[in-house]
Amino acid sequence: MDKLIITAAVTGNVPTRERTPYVPVTPKEIAQSVYESYLAGAAVAHVHARDEAGRPTHRIDVFKEIVERIREKCDIIVQVSTGARAGKTAEERGEALDLSPEMASLTTGSSNFPDQCNFNPPSLVEYLCERMKTRGTVPEIEIFDSAMIWSGLSLIQRGLIPEPPHFNLVLGVPGSLPATPKNLFFLYENLPRDCTWQVSSIGAIHVPLSMIAIALGGHVRTGLEDNIYYDKGVLATNPRLVERIVDIARAAGRDVAGPDEARRILSLRTQRAATAMS
């Protein structure tokens, strides 16, 4: 079994300072929270950006500042978001890909968020795939509903997503698959055998589902994007959430991967080398 890769999703699009004072918003704050999460045991940083008013944005200048500040502090894997809340057009959502990040999120179908549609038509998905492919950026295939697995497999078969693929099973978003062990097992059993995968659990069941993923050989995402509470009524911080997953993994006898070990497990350097040679 590979070492456990922990992804820190430190900001997201939804948490606000009104809900928790611990969510990082500015590029400086985001980079510092990523660094603290790295020190706690995270190997990947899932990065969203906010504009000057604290609203979600896909502006490349903001992402560039965040990435540069992170790079000054550590060698954590940076995974940029191409999600639907911060941009509507394909060009907006793919803007940060011009930074040639090691990884980026890629949702392979449409679903619902509580307040809007998570809109990902085939043309937009293919556009993002092509931009990632030309930059050597490895997609993390975001699965909010089961059909997105088969959409991802179709993209792999067509050569738009490199092999081996990496999946993120997102459970608990209102309007999408509920966060239950049964749903996690269903998604896991339908993944290709040669892939890597992680679970992102929204809400109180985050710890039990993370434990199941650790036992199955999967990986785990944690952070304030997914859960602002550490326990009932107790607000969390990003490094504390990472530390808890590290403690669970060690109690289960599974070592935690550093960034370079995660690069090997996720085949990141292989994909970059293949792109450079093409």
Image (spheres, rainbow, N blue to C red):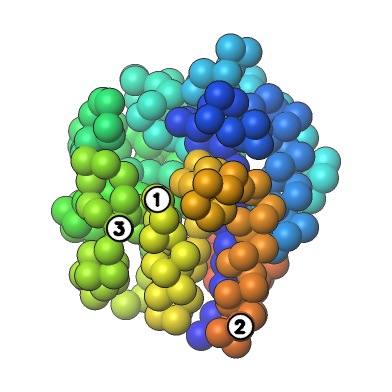
Whether the residues at callouts 1 and 3 have beta carbons within 8 Å, the answer is: yes
The residue that label 3 is drawn on is: 179
Residue located farthest toward the right when viewing the structure as drawn: 72
Q: Secondary structure at mark 3?
A: loop
Q: Looking at the image, which residue is at 67% across and 55% down?
A: 240
- Residue 15 in the image: state x and y as whole percent: 50, 32
Q: Nearer the viewer, residue 222 or 7?
A: 222
Q: Is residue 69 left or right of residue 232?
A: right
Give the residue type that dot 2 points to: Ala
Q: Looking at the image, which residue is at 35% across and 58% down?
A: 169
Residue located farthest toward the top when viewing the structure as drawn: 53
The residue that label 1 is drawn on is: 202
Q: Is residue 8 left or right of residue 73?
A: left
The residue that label 2 is drawn on is: 251
Quarter of image, res 99: top right
Decide: few, some or many residues near mark 1? Use Cα within 10 Å; few <14, some 14-19, many ≥20: many
Label 2 or label 1, whichever comes before in sequence order: 1
- Is any atom of residue 157 visible in this view? no
Q: Looking at the image, which residue is at 27% across and 63% down?
A: 180
